[in-house]
Image (cartoon, grey):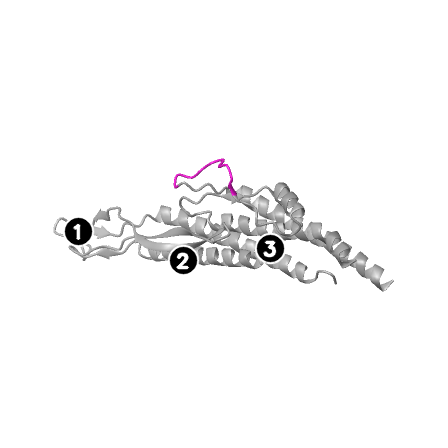
Amino acid sequence: MIERLQQSLQAQSEALALRAWRQQVIASNIANADTPGYRAVDFDFAAALERALRAQGQARLPRLVETPAAQPAADGNTVDLDTERAKFADNALRYEVALRALNGQIRTLLDAIRG
Amino acid sequence: MSLAKTFEIAAGAAQAQSLRLNAVASNLANAESAAAPGEAPYRARRVLFEALPARDGTAGVRVARVLEDASPPRRHYDPKHPLADAEGYVTLSNVSVVDEMVDMISAARAYQNNLEVMNSARNLMLKTLQLGS
């Protein structure tokens, strides 16, 4: 019974963890916007979530890949601040989406328990 | 926890940018500093950033070094100046005011960007704390 409850919450909680991780990755790109030679990184969220769900919570953090540079700077930095800020805002919103969905599931369960 | 790390990264970056802003302030303040003949004039300070890689693949940023700009000092003909040399030239610092203003705007914008990152991370953390209530 408890396992079934956990399973029902797993998808959203994995998504939440990955969103938080991506938030950190994008924050590190924004932090290094002026660092010579720094290369912007990101990961494929959909693939990472799929892998995390298949691994049943045992998946490791997804591998980071370099973001292709639209306009690399002369010092070798490939961070595009506009893109990174847009990604950051988008990711924050999607984090909230996952949070609300998880919250809804928890409330439903609580309602069922209270009767 | 990733969101707490986000905080750390953004805070480190804001600190680095504020150091850069300090260097700009020092350069602008000394833009017109003159040196007596034979003495070294003020040289513009340049802050060099360096990525601070964490084991998980993300990276913060820190100030690796503060360098002195190697470009030659400005020489200005002003024989009435008390620090003028025998030929009537005064040696001034090598600060380019235009470059410094550009650097200042860039540093200020980067600082703001990192503050905004911190703000969003804070909001998300607060919302996560209310989970289930």
- Residue type marked 3: Ser
Kindly identify which chain the residue marked by label 1 belongs to: B
Q: Please name the residue that numbered disc 1 is placed on.
A: B79
Report helix, strand or loop for mark 3.
helix
- Labels 2 & 3 near each other (Cβ < 8 A): no
Q: Is residue B24 left or right of residue A46?
A: left
Q: Residue at x 71, y 60 (%)?
A: B131
Q: Are marks 2 and 3 on the same chain?
A: yes
Residue B70: where, in percent of width, then height?
26, 48
Task: Give the label, 2 or 3, closer to the camera.
Answer: 3
Label 3, label 1: how far apart the Cα atoms are:
58 Å
Q: Is residue B119 visible?
A: no
Label 2 CA crowd tier, 10 Å (few <14, some 14–19, many 20+): some
Label 1, label 2: how far apart the Cα atoms are:
37 Å
Q: Which residues are magenta?
A: A65-75
Q: Please name the residue that numbered disc 3 is placed on.
A: B120
In front of the other: A112 or A95: A112
Label 2, label 3: how far apart the Cα atoms are:
23 Å
Q: Is residue B23 visible?
A: yes
For marks 3 and 1, the one nearer the N-term is 1
Q: Please name the residue that numbered disc 2 is placed on.
A: B19
- Residue type marked 1: Pro
Q: Are marks 3 and 1 on the same chain?
A: yes
Residue A67: where, in percent of width, then height?
51, 39
Kindly identify which chain the residue marked by label 3 belongs to: B
Q: Is residue B115 left or right of residue A47?
A: left
Q: Residue at x 22, y 47 (%)?
A: B75
Mainly helix, strand or loop, the magenta region? loop
Question: Quadrant where the N terminus of chain B lies?
Answer: bottom right
